[in-house]
Image (cartoon, rainbow, N blue to C red):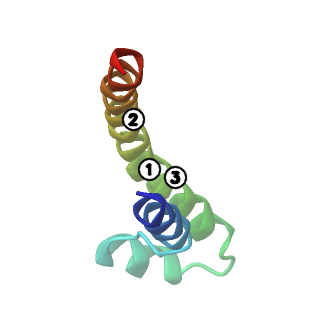
Amino acid sequence: MKRFVLFLLVFFLLFITSNAQCAMCRAVLESEEGQTTAEGVNDGIMYLMAIPYVLVGSVGFIIYWTFFRKKIVKK
């Protein structure tokens, strides 16, 4: 179980550093001089993509923890 949690943590950290722009957004934003707007759009896309994963992971953890605690109390 510890390996699985470590794998998820590493995967999530690698996911954060990836580029998330679609081809059209990238083409439009690369044509401009400063890259600050492109970085802002990329950060916004990553933020919007990460929130559902965090929510689903939290709900999954709460469900898992609820069933795990019941097993400990029954022993």
Residue 23 % position (x, y): 31, 78
Q: Is mark 3 on a helix, strand or loop?
A: helix
Q: Which of 36 and 49 is in front in this view?
A: 49
Residue positioned 37% across, 41% down in the render: 57
Marks 2 and 3, how far apart at CA: 26 Å
In the rendered image, which residue does mark 2 sit on?
A: 61
In the rendered image, which residue does mark 1 sit on?
A: 50
First of labels 3, 1 by sequence position:
3
Residue 3 % position (x, y): 45, 67
Marks 1 and 2, how far apart at CA: 16 Å
Tag 2: amino acid: Phe
Mark 2 crowd level (few <14, some 14–19, many ≥20, 10 Å Cα): few
Marks 3 and 1, how far apart at CA: 10 Å
Q: Which of 39 and 68 is in front in this view?
A: 68
Q: Which numbered tag is attached to residue 44?
A: 3
Mark 1 crowd level (few <14, some 14–19, many ≥20, 10 Å Cα): some
